[in-house]
Structure formats: structure tokens, C-alpha cells
């Protein structure tokens, strides 16, 4: 724990942490020493982890990387973080992220962007995006500042940053990990999950994080399987589907080659590989970028300058003025964009044309997966259509940024478990990720295919 605390303190230029909490990590290490002496070690005794700053932590500032939550210290602990402390883990600090988890590069944070520890090997020294929104988590793990971290995934925020930084991360089935105490973005999509150096560590973390929680109305009332004990890279008897609609136009040849390599690895592990069709794939991105902002505009209505964090009360202002001034000052540009899109698609005149239609297409996307499961047990795709891009490259072009989520949002809309594992390096020496998507509740199948690839 001391070595990680020192590493975090020495790595300030990466900007991966918003707050450091060395005392918490060191206390867990002391508790682990005592537990070792009495033979009462727990699954994560003494393990120092990073906590995405979207999880409420009692008495420790929680910002969602937004000025809107300036000065907010929750009086309660999120269920997922509480579960991790019960398992013996300690917190190194709160990790940077895209503001309210909205973004794919960590550049929408009010605390500045995170810098990926990776560099292109062609001599170009451009600082690269660590992915987003869990960019602090991905950068910290790949820079070896912590062995594991929490993430949240609404449309890819665990998987895409994992792919950009050469680490692993799993978004479990919607409802496996409690959303209670996690700052809400789009509640029908939000799902916490672990990020770590390898598949085994993800399995151990997920076992500690998951479980039924009566405080989350969409929490699944199921026991937590022994995923780590069930790990096996033997895929004999499994059929892996390759969705042909994911071969999108303009996909770089290196991503195609990575995908072919992934297919070969799964065949070597004994899997049978077949082509499948998910015909509504091309509607997933527009559907996601209607539903997620709609839910966000509703969830973010609570930031009124009265209950949490920031209050901007100009001289002589009435209540309406205070709301407006607080929200104008507190929210960043991307958050405001989402609130405007969301309120527009939910407005009386446009509800049927956009929001209702998107809900119908969401059902069709879920049905595509159901039909694919008649032919296969798992799906293999690239995680993202590119390797890490340079900071600033897409920051002024929201549509280009949204396009980076093309492979991750369909499984989010369907609530399915999906994982990114490192697949190799591109010609510039940058990591590329492979994504495995599974049936609802089949995290074991997903983890096992991940193990066969890594
Ligand atoms: N990049 C996507 C977005 O901006 C996904 C974010 C997430 O999963 N939290 O909405």
C-alpha cells in the first residue's frame, strides 16, 4: 500500500486523481496485517484501489468532476464502495472522469483532462486521451498507480478506456452492481463494474462489488457467483458469434486484423466461430444519444443550488434567478448540451418522434441479441473503432466523439454483460481492445473468453 501511495503522489502530471486519500489505503493495509496474524484475511484485504469520483464516499468530497458538486461531502457511502471496504480493500483516492460521466476522452472534466501514460512510438509526442468517462481509472491502472479501480459504464465508459490503455474491464449485466450512491447519469443504462490489469483481478473485484441491494429498485435479486473459481480458458463446446454489421465502413485495417487475431485465439481455445447478424446495429448510436440525454436531463434536474454543492445567488436574485445562475455556473458545456438534447426529445411536441421512437428501437436492438443467442453463446467485436486519439483531436467535435462509442452502446442498450481485454498493439505501439459480449447473467462466459484472449 505504501508503494502505491507514493506512486500516486509522484504521478501528479497524469491528473488521474481528483483527491488522494492515503490514510484510507494505509488503514486497510494495517487491518490486513492484523487479519493475516489471526488468519482472517478477506478477499481484498489490504488491496489499495482507486474509486471513480462518481461513487459517493462518506465524508470524502465527491465531485462527478463537475463544479456543480463543489464542496459536496456525502453523509453516506455507495453500496459498491461499501462492499469493497467490507471485502478489505482501501481507497487510494477519488479518480478523475468526464463530467457526470459524459464523454469518451475525460476532457469534459472540470478538473482538467487526464493524460494517458501511453505515447505513440513514431516520435510524435502528442499527449493521448485515456478514454472516457472512466479515464482516471484507466490511466491510474495502466500507469501502475493502483492494481484495480471502479468504473461505471453507461455506453462504454469502462470498456473504451480499458481498450485505450491496455487493461481489462467488465460491465456486468444491468442490475448486478447496485447503483445506490452512484451519481446518476442515465439510470436505465448506468452500471458499475471493475477495471484491473487482467481478467482474474476483474473477476475478484466484481465478486466483491456485486450483489442484491434493496436500496436500488433495479438491483437483481441473485446470489453472486464464484466467478474467480469458475475461470477457465477452455472454450470447447462454446460457439462465438461474429456480428457482420460491426464491420463498419472506414474501420482501420489494424482493427480488422486485431479482430481476426481474436477469432484465431478463440478457435485455439476450442471455440466454434460463426457469423451472426444484428440488423439494427446502425441505429444503436442515435438511439443511445436520445435515451441517455433524456434520462440525464431528468436526473440532473435535482441540481438546483439548494440541496447539493454549488449555490450561485446573485444580489437581489429570486429563486428562478438562483436556479439559472447556479446551473449556468456549475455545469460544463457537454453537460449543458445533453440537458438541452434531453429536454428537447422529452418535450410535448417531440416526445413521440424521438424519445418514444428510440424506446421502440431499443427493444429491437435487444431482440437482435436474443435472436443471435439461438446461434451462439458469446459475441466477439473490437471495443472501439480506433486506438487512443490525441487530446484535443475530437474535443470540439461532439459527433466525432460520439462515434467512438459505436461498438459499446448496443450491449448497453440491451443490458448485457460485456468486457474489454487487451488484444495487442497497433503500428504506433498503442493498445487495442477486443470486446466480448455475453447473454444476460453470463459474466462467467465473458470472463472465460477474456481469459482465453489475454
Ligand atoms: N461516451 C459515452 C457518453 O458520453 C458513454 C459514457 C458512459 O458510459 N458513462 O455518453
Image: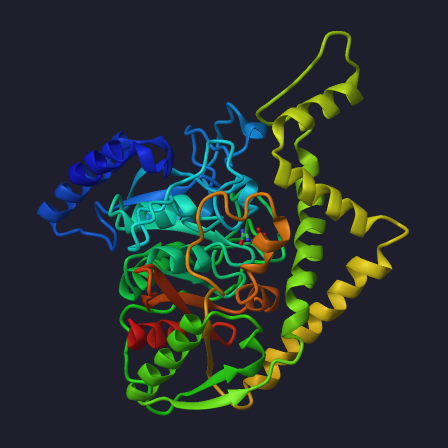
Considering the image in quadrants, where does the N terminus appear?
Answer: top left
Q: Position of residue 87 (x, y in %)?
A: 30, 50
Give the number of callouts. 0
Quadrant where the C terminus lies? bottom left
Q: Nearer the viewer, residue 40 or 236?
A: 236
Q: Quadrant of residue 140?
A: top left
Q: Tell me if residue 230 comes above or below residue 114 in the rendering.
A: below
- The residue lying at 36 percent from left, 39 percent from top is 16
Color style of the picture: rainbow
- Name the one closer to the observer, 283 or 397: 397
Question: What residue is drawn where x is 56% and y is 54%?
Answer: 190
- Determine whether, in the image, residue 337 is placed left or right of residue 82: right
Residue 449 vertical placement versus 58 (above, below): below
In the drawing, does residue 391 fall left or right of residue 50? right
- Residue 396 pos. (x, y %): 59, 43
Foreground: 313 or 307?
313
Q: Which residue lies furthest to the left in this view?
A: 37
Foreground residue, 251 or 274?
251
Q: Where is residue 151 in the image (x, y as percent from the top left)?
A: 43, 51
**Residue 355, image quadrant:** bottom right
Q: Furthest residue to the right?
A: 349
Whether residue 87 appears in this view of the structure is no
Percent from the top left, x then y, of residue 21? 31, 31
Residue 117 in sight here: yes
Position above or below: 286 against 49 = below
Seen from this angle, which residue lies furthest front? 123
Q: Which residue is found at the position 22% from the left and 48% from the top?
A: 45
Q: Which residue is drawn at 79% across and 65% down?
A: 357
Left or right position of 425 against 349: left
Q: Is residue 72 above or below residue 395?
A: above
Amino acid at each position: 500500500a505504501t508503494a502505491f501511495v507514493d506512486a500516486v503522489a509522484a504521478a501528479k502530471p497524469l491528473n488521474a486523481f481528483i483527491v488522494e486519500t492515503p490514510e484510507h489505503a494505509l488503514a486497510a493495509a494495517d487491518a490486513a496485517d492484523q487479519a493475516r496474524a489471526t488468519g482472517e484475511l478477506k478477499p481484498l484485504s489490504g488491496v489499495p484501489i482507486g474509486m471513480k469520483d462518481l461513487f459517493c464516499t462518506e465524508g470524502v468530497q465527491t465531485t462527478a468532476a463537475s463544479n456543480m458538486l463543489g464542496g459536496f461531502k456525502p453523509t453516506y457511502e455507495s453500496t459498491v464502495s461499501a462492499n469493497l471496504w467490507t471485502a478489505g480493500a482501501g481507497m487510494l483516492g477519488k479518480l478523475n472522469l468526464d463530467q457526470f460521466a459524459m464523454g469518451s476522452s475525460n476532457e469534459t472534466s472540470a478538473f482538467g483532462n487526464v493524460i494517458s501514460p501511453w505515447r505513440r512510438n513514431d516520435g510524435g509526442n502528442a499527449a493521448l486521451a485515456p478514454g472516457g468517462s472512466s479515464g482516471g481509472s484507466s490511466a491510474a491502472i495502466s500507469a501502475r498507480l493502483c492494481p484495480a479501480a471502479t468504473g461505471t459504464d453507461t455506453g462504454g465508459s469502462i470498456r473504451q478506456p480499458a481498450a485505450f490503455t491496455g487493461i481489462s474491464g467488465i460491465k456486468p449485466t444491468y442490475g448486478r452492481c447496485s447503483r445506490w450512491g452512484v451519481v446518476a447519469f442515465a439510470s436505465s443504462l448506468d452500471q458499475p463494474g471493475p477495471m484491473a490489469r487482467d481478467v482474474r483481478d476483474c473477476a475478484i473485484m466484481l465478486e466483491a462489488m456485486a450483489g442484491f441491494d434493496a436500496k436500488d429498485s433495479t438491483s437483481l435479486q441473485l446470489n453472486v457467483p464464484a466467478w474467480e473459481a469458475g475461470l477457465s480458458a477452455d472454450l470447447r463446446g462454446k460457439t462465438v458469434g461474429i456480428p457482420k454489421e460491426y464491420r463498419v465502413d472506414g474501420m482501420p485495417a489494424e482493427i480488422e486484423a486485431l479482430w481476426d487475431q481474436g477469432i484465431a485465439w478463440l478457435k485455439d481455445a476450442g471455440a466454434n466461430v460463426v457469423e451472426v447478424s444484428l440488423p439494427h446495429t446502425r441505429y444503436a448510436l442515435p438511439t443511445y444519444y436520445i435515451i441517455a440525454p433524456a434520462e440525464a436531463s431528468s436526473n440532473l434536474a435535482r441540481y438546483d443550488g439548494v440541496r447539493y454543492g454549488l449555490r450561485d445567488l446573485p444580489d437581489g436574485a429570486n429563486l428562478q434567478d438562483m436556479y439559472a445562475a447556479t446551473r449556468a455556473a456549475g455545469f460544463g458545456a457537454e453537460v449543458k448540451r445533453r440537458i438541452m438534447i434531453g429536454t428537447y426529445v422529452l418535450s410535448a411536441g417531440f416526445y413521440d418522434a424521438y424519445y418514444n421512437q428510440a424506446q421502440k428501437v431499443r427493444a429491437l436492438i435487444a431482440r437482435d441479441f436474443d435472436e443471435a443467442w439461438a446461434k451462439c453463446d458469446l459475441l466477439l467485436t473490437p471495443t472501439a473503432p480506433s486506438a487512443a486519439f490525441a487530446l484535443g483531436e475530437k474535443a470540439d467535435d461532439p459527433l466525432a466523439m460520439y462515434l467512438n462509442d459505436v461498438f459499446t452502446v448496443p450491449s448497453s442498450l440491451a443490458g448485457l454483460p460485456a468486457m474489454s481485454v487487451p488484444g495487442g498493439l497497433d503500428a504506433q505501439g498503442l493498445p487495442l481492445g477486443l470486446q466480448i459480449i455475453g447473454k444476460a447473467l453470463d459474466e462467467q462466459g465473458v470472463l472465460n473468453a477474456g481469459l482465453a484472449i489475454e
